[in-house]
Amino acid sequence: MKNLTREIVERIEKIAQPVKIMHVCGSHEHTIMQHGIRTLIPPEVEVVAGPGCPVCCVPSREVDEIMYLARQGVTITTFGDMLRVPGTNGCLADARAEGADVRIVYGVGNAVEIAKKLDNEVVFMAAGFETTAPTTASEVVSEPPENFSLLSCHRLIPPALKFLIESGEVNLNALIEPGHVSTIIGTQPYEVFSEKYGIPQVVTGFNPFDVLIAIYLILKQIKEENPHVQNEYKRAVRAEGNVKAQELMDEVFYIKSREWRGFPSIPDSVYEIRDTYSQFNAREKFDIPELESKEVVTGCICGPILRGVARPEDCKLFRDECNPVNPVGACMVSKEGTCNIAYRYGSLK
Ligand code: SF4
């Protein structure tokens, strides 16, 4: 293993040049930090984390919506990570402390089971990228009970990439594409970024060799002036993706524009439930009002971190005031959050 690592690193060193490579996956950031990958590669090869944590990307508005429902007496079900993601006036953990019925589940299936056992209305806060949206869709088409509905907070990765490339704020030169998301959407949605913007891209898996090989392949594309989408994760990702899952998502969701945490409204970047299934759309069912939402100013720089223009170490609150026990911002709450990962693995590099 050591020899293989050395060989890949040596190949990287031979063709290294100044480049900023963005990845958009909490699992990739985890691998990079756990294995010290930023310390293995030449400093001019910069690997930055983008909006790779789906829980972190949920904006205050969506937390406010679920808080509104919790305070109306609706039973809320959600992933444990969501409990402490801040909205404009607190988080779901606060609502639970006030007496609201907020329950942690491992997935939408558990939420449906809870609804079957209760007379009360049950809402599942469905956060996640294209990876988890098919599971949500499959419950919607499986005739869940009438007292069950969803607050869709599902988001799409390619529109966020397009936004980041076009904004120019992060000046990214290349992309490591997320393995999990790509198992569903395939490689085709990324092609435009190479064709239109000349961005080299590699879809890769989650072990340290996958990440190192992706870095090498990107540098090779740059050296050969041949930007394209390369699939290093063929053991899981097909060019066309998972067509059945795509059809299921298309049956249940349509795509619309909405803001992400740290981003303004990103065009065509979220999944919302189609009218055909509006009885399962909590926004329709409960007529949630337009809420005066805002990101609360606490000194937290989750926004720039999610856009890849800051690191946790740039935040004055990192470690002492903000840590996994007392998280101030969304990026410290979730185990996929860049701040949480940086806290656990220790340093910038
Ligand atoms: S360390 Fe905490 S306060 Fe600072 S950016 Fe990260 S989550 Fe926000």
Image: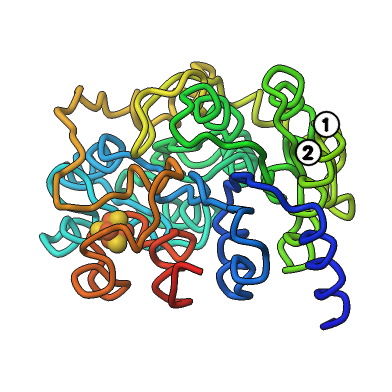
Q: Does the residue labelled 2 lie within 8 Å of ligand 1?
A: no
Residue 278 x, y percent position in the rendering: 45, 22
Q: How far apart are marks 2 and 1 (CA)?
A: 5 Å
Which residue lies at the image location 84% right of the left edge and 45% below the top edge? 220
> What is the three-letter code of the residue carrying label 2?
Ile
Tag 2, which secondary structure?
helix
Q: In which quarter of the image is the N terminus?
A: bottom right
The residue that disc 1 covers is: 225
Q: In this view, does 232 lie to the left or right of 95?
A: right
Of residues 30 and 47, which is closer to you in this image?
47
Q: Is residue 218 left or right of residue 331?
A: right
Q: Which mark is residue 330?
A: none
Which residue lies at the image location 57% right of the left edge and 66% below the top edge? 30
Residue 155 x, y percent position in the rendering: 51, 35
Residue 151 x, y percent position in the rendering: 39, 37
The residue that disc 2 covers is: 222
Crowdedness near tag 2: few (<14), some (14–19) or many (≥20) residues, C-alpha within 10 Å = many
Crowdedness near tag 1: few (<14), some (14–19) or many (≥20) residues, C-alpha within 10 Å = few
The reply to whether dot 2 and dot 1 touch (C-beta < 8 Å) is yes
Viewer can see residue 160: yes
Q: In this view, does 10 lie to the left or right of 51?
A: right
- In the rendered image, the vertical position of residue 10 relative to residue 47, given as above or below: below
- In the rendered image, the vertical position of residue 332 relative to residue 323, given as above or below: above
